[in-house]
Each structure stands twice: as structure tokens, then as C-alpha cells.
Amino acid sequence: PGALLTLSRRYLEETPDFEDLLKQEVDKKAASQLEGGTDKVESRDGPLTELLKHHKLALLIGSLGTAGTGALWYVPPMYGVQFMQQFDKLPANAVTFSELLGYAIPTALALFVGMLVDAWGACKVYTVALLAGCIVAPAPLLYWWAHVPQALAVPTVLIGQAILGLLLAL
């Protein structure tokens, strides 16, 4: 697809706004060369270099948040239930239904979580979701799943997946 996009890009015309922007950049470089009396054009850092030089904390927080969200969406809902299926001999249909429940709840609550994001702000909702979903909830939930009597395994999995679904909705 890259070669096809490159070929098709050749025949597109630039918008007038983009051409004006390019002209302004060329004029700005020419003016700085004339005023400074040097032929050397000021070099700018690339986006990755700029990110690593000036935004280390934001990069760390964003990377850990992304990793935590990915782990929250995959590890407890999938591996936790598979663990219980293996050791408590859960029926396959109960496991599949619990996984469906864990992912259906966020889908059903998406509109309301959007309203919450509008009211609180995305940063606060994301922070609460990361704290509750990646730090507070998984350990007690997995401990509960690991120590439940076999007779209560199916309702425990369904309740646990419902709790995870609420956290995943955020």
C-alpha cells in the first residue's frame, strides 16, 4: 500500500493554505539568512529528539499509562478466567460468557463514560481508571478468584468480570 499511496500522492494538488505555509517558511529562512549574514540554516531537532530532550516525564507517564491500560484490558479478563477454568474446572460456556460480559459492559457504558469525561475531563477519568484498574483492583480480584471454593467459582467469575467491565469502561 505504501507504493500505491506514493504514486497516487504525486498527482494530488496542494491546498492553497499549505502552499502559503510553505512560502512563509521559505521567506522566514531567507530573511534569517540575510539578517544574520550566514549561509548556515538553523537546524531543528527531529520530533523524537525533541520528545526525548524536553518531555521525559510526559513520555514516561504516557508509556506507563498505555502499558497499564493494555494490561488491564487483556490480562485479568483473559488469563484470570483461564486460570480459574483450569483449576476450578469451570465449564467453557461460563468462561466465554464471563469474557463476553467483561467486554459488553464497557460497550454499554461508553455513552455515560463520555458524559463523565465531558464533566470531569479526560485526564481525571484516565487517572482514576489507571489507579483503580491497574493498581487497586487486579490483586484483590485475582486473590479472590484463586481462593474461592469450587462451588462458587462460576458466580465469582461473573461478578469479577462485571467489576472489571466497570473499570474497563473508564
Image (cartoon, rainbow, N blue to C red):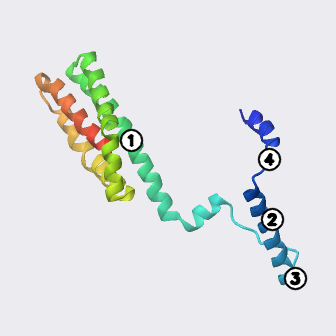
Q: CA distance from mark 2 to mark 1?
A: 47 Å
- Residue drawn at x 43%, y 52% is 64
Q: Which residue is mark 3?
A: 37
Q: Residue at x 82, y 67 (%)?
A: 26
At label 1, the amino acid type is Ala
Which percent across, then down, holds residue 62? 46, 55
Q: Quadrant of residue 81?
A: top left
Determine crowd level at label 2: few under 14, some 14-19, many 20+ residues with C-alpha closer than 10 A: few
Q: Which residue is mark 2?
A: 23
Q: Position of residue 69 (x, y in %)?
A: 39, 45
65 up-or-down from 41: above or below: above
Tag 2 or tag 4, which sits nearer the N-term? 4
Which structural element holds mark 4?
Answer: loop
Tell us which disc is closer to us: 1 or 4. Answer: 4
Give the side of residue 139 with respect to residue 54, left or right. Answer: left
For marks 3 and 1, the one nearer the N-term is 3
Q: Residue at x 77, y 62 (%)?
A: 20
Q: How far apart are the two marked residues, 3 and 2, measured between alpha carbons?
A: 21 Å
| Mark 3 crowd level (few <14, some 14–19, many ≥20, 10 Å Cα) | few
Q: Write down the residue under mark 1.
A: 71
Looking at the rendered structure, the kind of residue marked 4 is: Glu
Number of the front mark, 3 or 4: 4
Position of residue 110 in the picture relative to residue 5 (left or right): left
Query: Can residue 127 be spotted in the picture?
Result: no
Kindly identify the amino acid type of the residue bearing the numbered disc 2. Lys
How many angstroms separate mark 3 from mark 4 (CA)? Answer: 35 Å
Point out residue 66 in the picture as x, y percentages from the top left corner: 44, 48
Between discs 1 and 4, the one toward the N terminus: 4
Tell which circle, 2 or 1, labels the residue nearer the N-terminal end.
2
- Chain-order first, disc 3 or disc 4: 4
